[in-house]
């Protein structure tokens, strides 16, 4: 495959191009493991386990992730959750009041929120009725100031993965960065777009430890891209944006491959079982295909059914206000025990 010609300098903000990143004490001296007396960072010298600043570049964790994904550690940026990663992308490449991004509702709501925070126009192109990108409309609405295109695949809240053909067409023809949010990729039979990074210099892939890895509480988001793109993002990231405790817990979890794979397998089994039961519930009108750890279902009256479940002590997500999602509920796949409780509640809810 011929690699797309793409010049990163054409989309980096002018003030970022000449920016020198903050140099922390741990940037100037990197420990080689030998016993040293550290008197350079104005830290409290008394040992608490976290009295020292963390590695600002998360080197060990990046090494493991890079090896796992088949990329260079220079192609990774780690952040305080995916939201920080996405915000850094906005701030590096989008000029406030001038540039725009394109998002595809119904989708993850933070793209729109971050556009508003950064004073960037958000051009919305609805997905088709099959929850696929409307490629011709996306490319038609894009202009010279369209810096970012967000593709959430598998998509939230619809649960489906976008077609490879549509994504390739957008990568080939969109002149800004194509950001593929793969928060749910571990539950999908589709392969990650990380493998396509050598072929598409305008491709950015974001992932997270919040879903399949069960680490939502530690806030760890991951960005995979070319070394050039990551270098730009490193210029503007806070020096110690990923704390020591997060790095330790993330590394331990990432190395525990068997446990993670086992939990993902259990979730997929429970997903199929839950789909089978939902299809038998009288007020469920349609179940959408899912490549994620949740199921989107169309019901007769989403608000009514949401409140009925709430009274039974079960919290699901009412997505009826989202475009193309009228009267839909989103069910996260829980443990076998939690799903039994949900199934019992659904079967005992009156249809009147």
Image (spheres, grey):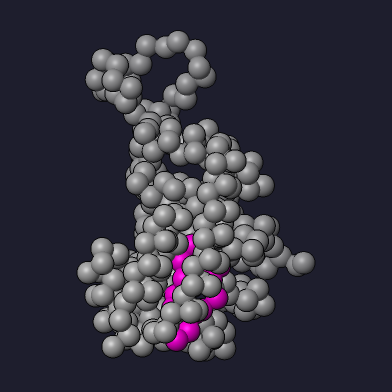
Does residue 266 show up?
yes
Q: Position of residue 140 (x, y in %)?
A: 52, 88
Residue at point 49%, 12% (across, down) = 34
Q: Is residue 268 left or right of residue 125?
A: right
Specify the quadrant that holds the N terminus. bottom right
Residue at point 27%, 81% (across, down) = 303
Instruction: Decide whether residue 290 is among the magenta residues.
Output: yes
Instruction: Decide whether residue 231 is among the magenta residues.
Output: no
Residue stretch rendered in magenta on the structure:
285-297
Q: Is residue 192 left or right of residue 254?
A: right
Q: Position of residue 73 (x, y in %)?
A: 58, 42
Residue at point 55%, 82% (across, down) = 132
Vertical position of residue 190 compared to residue 251: above or below: below
Q: Position of residue 305 (x, y in %)?
A: 30, 79
Q: Position of residue 299 (x, y in %)?
A: 39, 84
Specify the quadrant that holds the C terminus. bottom left
Residue at point 53%, 72% (across, down) = 276
Vertical position of residue 114 compared to residue 252: above or below: below
């Amino acid at each position: 495959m011929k690699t797309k010609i793409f010049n990163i300098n054409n989309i980096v903000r002018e003030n970022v191009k000449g920016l020198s990143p903050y140099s922390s004490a741990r940037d100037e001296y990197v420990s080689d493991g030998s016993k040293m007396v550290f008197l350079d960072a104005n830290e409290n010298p008394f040992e608490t386990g976290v009295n020292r600043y963390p590695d600002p570049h998360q080197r060990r964790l990046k090494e493991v992730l890079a090896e796992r994904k088949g990329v260079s550690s220079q192609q990774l940026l780690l952040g305080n959750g995916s939201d920080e990663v996405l915000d850094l992308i906005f701030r590096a490449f989008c000029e406030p009041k001038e540039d725009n991004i394109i998002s595809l509702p119904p989708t993850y709501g933070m793209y729109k929120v971050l556009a508003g925070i950064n004073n960037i126009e958000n051009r919305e192109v609805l997905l088709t009725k099959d929850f696929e990108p409307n490629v011709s409309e996306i490319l038609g609405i894009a202009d010279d100031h369209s810096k970012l295109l967000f593709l959430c695949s598998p998509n939230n809240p619809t649960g489906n993965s976008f077609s490879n053909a549509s994504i390739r067409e957008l990568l080939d023809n969109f002149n800004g960065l194509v950001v593929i949010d793969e928060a749910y990729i571990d539950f999908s039979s589709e392969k990650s777009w990380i493998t396509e990074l050598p072929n598409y210099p305008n491709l950015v892939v974001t992932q997270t430890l919040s879903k399949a890895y069960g680490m939502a509480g530690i806030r760890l988001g991951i960005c995979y891209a070319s070394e050039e793109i990551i270098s730009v993002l490193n210029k503007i990231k806070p020096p110690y944006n990923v704390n020591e405790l997060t790095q330790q817990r993330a590394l331990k979890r990432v190395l525990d491959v068997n446990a993670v794979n086992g939990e993902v397998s259990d979730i997929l089994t429970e997903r199929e079982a839950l789909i089978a039961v939902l299809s038998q519930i009288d007020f469920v009108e349609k179940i959408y295909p899912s490549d994620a750890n949740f199921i989107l279902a169309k019901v007769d009256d989403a608000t009514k059914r949401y409140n009925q479940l709430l009274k039974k002590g079960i919290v699901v997500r009412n997505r009826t206000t989202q475009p193309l999602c009228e009267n839909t509920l989103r069910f996260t796949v829980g443990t076998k025990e939690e799903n039994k409780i949900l199934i019992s509640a659904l079967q005992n809810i009156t249809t009147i």
